[in-house]
Amino acid sequence: MSNLERIIRLKTVLARTGLPRSTVYRKIAEGTFPHQFKISVHGTGWRESAINRWIADPVSFREEGASQ
């Protein structure tokens, strides 16, 4: 991971995307939104670069490895 790569939490993801929480998790399940990853025992986060890629082109975003 690059030194410039930031990890952002759910509150920031929701503010940046304008999506409600339920939509974020539905889109993750569909493979049309970046997956979060575990950063502590009770916390998860997203790579800011992945969220930026989604913001740049939400319609054609596909998580790597997701079925199409």
Image (cartoon, rainbow, N blue to C red):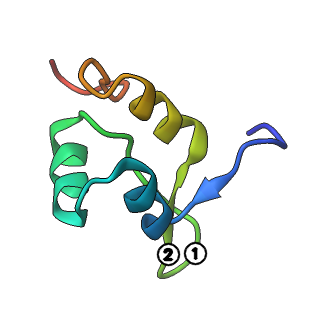
In this rendering, position of residue 64 left or right of residue 12: left
Quadrant occupied by the N terminus? top right
Please tell me in which quadrant of the rendered image residue 2 appears.
Answer: top right
Looking at the image, which residue is at 45% across and 52% down? 16
Q: In this rendering, is residue 46 above or below 52?
A: below
Q: Position of residue 19 (x, y in %)?
A: 26, 54
Q: Is residue 6 left or right of residue 8?
A: right
Q: Which mark is residue 19?
A: none
The answer to whether marks 1 and 2 mark residues whose Cβ atoms lie closer than 8 Å is yes
Dot 1 amino acid type: Ser
On screen, residue 29 above or below 59:
below
Kindly state the secondary structure of the residue where label 1 is placed.
Answer: loop
Image vertical order of residue 11 relative to residue 23, above or below: below
Q: Quadrant of the C terminus?
A: top left
Residue farthest to the bottom, as pictured: 42
Looking at the rendered structure, the secondary structure element under dot 2 is loop
The residue drawn where x is 15% and y is 51% is 26
Residue 5: x %, y % from top left: 72, 43
- Name the amino acid type tagged 2: Gly
Label tally: 2
